[in-house]
Structures are given as C-alpha cells and as structure tokens.
Image (spheres, grey):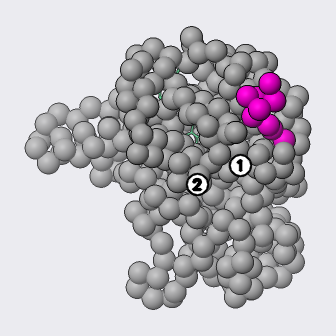
Amino acid sequence: MGFKIAVAGATGNVGREMLNILEERGFPAEEVVPLASRRSVGTEVSYGDRTLKVKALDSYDFSGTDICLMSAGGSVSKEWSPRIGKQGCVVIDNSSAWRYDADVPLIVPEVNADAIEGFTKKNIIANPNCSTAQLVVALKPLHDAATIRRVVISTYQSVSGAGKEGMDELFEQTRAVFVADPIEAKKFTKRIAFNVIPHIDVFMEDGSTKEEWKMVAETKKMLDAKIKLTATCVRVPVFIGHSEAVNIEFEKPITADEAREILREAPGCLVVDKREDGGYVTPLESAGEDAAYISRIREDSTLDNGLNLWVVSDNLRKGAALNTVQIAEMLVARGLIKPKKQAA
Ligand SMILES: NC(=O)c1ccc[n+]([C@@H]2O[C@H](COP(=O)([O-])OP(=O)(O)OC[C@H]3O[C@@H](n4cnc5c(N)ncnc54)[C@H](OP(=O)(O)O)[C@@H]3O)[C@@H](O)[C@H]2O)c1
C-alpha cells in the first residue's frame, strides 16, 4: 500500500518538477493528485507516462491524503497549510511562509536531517529558499571540517526562480529585442533580457533585499547560528540554474586541496574543478541535474583561513522540488508517516 500525495501548485515551475521527480525516484505513491487555482481546473499535467487532470486546491478534501507537496506561493500557504496540517496531512512547503517559525523544521536532508523530528507540532515542514539550499549543501561539510566564521556571497539567479511568469518575461523580451518590438517589464523591475538586476524580493529597512536576508536567516537556522553571512542577490538572464560566488573565512586552516577532497565525498555535492578552459560548471549544464556542482575552489590569500568557491545548481530541483521530495522520502524512510489507507 502506497501513499496518497497531493501536489499543490502543480501547474507551476516547481510543481511540474515535483511530479517529474516523484516519478523518477520511484516515490511509493499509490495516488498523486495535482492541485492548483480554480483557473487551472481540468488542465493536464504529466506524471511519468500518465496524464493527470488538475483539481482546485480550495475545494479539495485533504483528510484522506498523506502528504501535500506545496508550491503555490506564500499567501496560499499561509492560508492553507495549517488547515491541511490539521486534517492530518503533512505539508512540505516551498514558500517562505513557515521557514522562520520555531515550530516548523526547515530542512535540507544533507545538512540537518534530524531536525525533522519536530514537524508534528504543526504538521508543516519548510523547504529553504533555492539559493540557500545549494549553498548549505556545500557549506556543511566544510563547516564540519574547519568551522566557518563568515561567508560573503554573490548570487547569479535564473529567471525561473521568479516562477513561470519570470521565464515568459525573459523569452518575450529577448524576442522583442530581435524584432525591435517595444519591451515591457512586468515581473521584473527593469529589463532582464541582456541585463542583470541587483534586486530580488522586497527591500528591507537596512537596504538589503528580502532574498539576501533569507540567505542569512536560513543558513543560521539550518547550519549554525554563529555563522556570519552577507549576500548580494542578482537576477541574471538565464532560464534555469542559480550560480553563487562564495568567499568563506574559517576558524581553522583548510587548503583548497583539502576542501576539494572533502567536497568530493560530501552528499549532494559534485566537484568539477579543472584549472583549464571549461573546467567548471555553468548553470546551463546544471539544468535537469540534482547535484550542487562546485568549481573554482581556491585559497583566498587576503584571509588567514579563506577559500573561494563557485556553486551552481538547478534551482527548480535541489533549490525546490528535489529537496521537497527528499524530505518526503525521509518521512517514509524514518517511519514518521504511514499511509492513511493502511492505517484505517
Ligand atoms: N522557482 C524556484 O526556484 C523556487 C525555489 C524555491 C521555492 N520556490 C517557491 O515555490 C513556490 C512556487 O514557485 P513556482 O516557481 O513554481 O511559481 P509559478 O511557476 O508561478 O507557479 C505557481 C503555482 O501556484 C499555483 N497557485 C497560485 N495561486 C493559487 C491559489 N490561489 N490556489 C492554488 N494554487 C495557486 C499556480 O496555479 P495556477 O496555474 O492555477 O495559477 C501554480 O501552479 C513559490 O512559493 C516560490 O517562492 C520557488
């Protein structure tokens, strides 16, 4: 007997990827129900070689469903996740709505798997922001080896991180440039085609953006509250794959060779680091892949114990859908959830 899984936001970038990954990894699902807004009722989505028809989230009865993989945005999650959790269905949420709630575990399985035990307080588990997920996968093994003191990070984030509308905007603007049509900026604040924009999410009082603040707060919650982190998050005209230039200061000495060896063995990491033309990974090559790719590992001679890295990953997979499905797999593997049908 398998699990009944709802995928809320199934017509979106992350939801479609969740359906792919559930099928690819052979998740023990007896039934998968795609949900979205009323606008999408009847829309067909793929689950392996099957076609499923989307139902409306707001009229769905969750009482017989075991797990809801939620990627329908923050306001939908704020309203619906507690109600779904109260019906005995565990929500694994991709939005930022619950990440900073002390009663909600924020999980990257390679980093803080044991923190999942607290999920029953609200029956909600949070998935981190895409740029944080790939970062902490790379930082965790290095922190264990040499204790990270401070991280300075610059991100180069793809438009798919802003949902399907973000991808459409890059496509439309690029086409408009070539045919000399007028260019409209709707989703992004400035033109994204052939440009970069140093602004993701809203501005905070101290001048940082919410995306930058999320990287700080989530790294502290999942890895170590003592780590100091400062970020500049930038949107770039890339469809899929976030890249990060990461400078790390450690308490203890660590060489580039040692870091390379540690990262080669670390779960979720793949080192591609040849000091030659093309000996590194770009976002285009990360699309459709699961790993956090790590390249350009080198010592920073301006610090006592400093390293630089380049980290690239598919933001729709490790940054969202893959991590969500890995959390669901952990619930099953640790016996933290049983199929309701079997229990009845
Ligand atoms: N993209 C990333 O890299 C990434 C990474 C981490 C986390 N996330 C988070 O994941 C969530 C989804 O992102 P996305 O990129 O997949 O966005 P998206 O492509 O814009 O898709 C949004 C999904 O939410 C659904 N939705 C919107 N309003 C709804 C409502 N009132 N009731 C039910 N469903 C509703 C949409 O359904 P309709 O088609 O019916 O409108 C669609 O399926 C966001 O919270 C985002 O912050 C995204």
The region drawn magenta spans 336-344
Relative image position of residue 289 (x, y in whole percent): 50, 62
CA gap, disc 2 to disc 1?
A: 10 Å
Q: Is residue 186 visible?
A: yes
Q: Measuring 41% from the left and 81% from the top, which residue is drawn there?
A: 278
Q: Is residue 331 left or right of residue 23?
A: right
The numbered dot on residue 25 is 2
Marks 1 and 2: in contact by CB < 8 Å? yes
Q: Is residue 150 magenta?
A: no
Q: Quadrant of the N terminus?
A: top right
Categorize mark 1 by other alpha carbons within 10 Å: few (<14), some (14-19), many (20+).
some
Q: Is residue 338 left or right of residue 231?
A: right
Q: Label 2 is placed on what type of residue? A: Arg
Q: Quadrant of the C terminus?
A: top right
Q: Label 1 is placed on what type of residue? A: Glu
**Dot 2 or dot 1, earlier in sequence:** 2
Relative image position of residue 110 (x, y in whole percent): 75, 60
Determine the secondary structure under disc 1: helix
Q: Measuring 30% from the left and 52% from the top, which residue is drawn there?
A: 194
List the residue tagged with mark 1: 329
Relative image position of residue 157 (x, y in whole percent): 49, 51
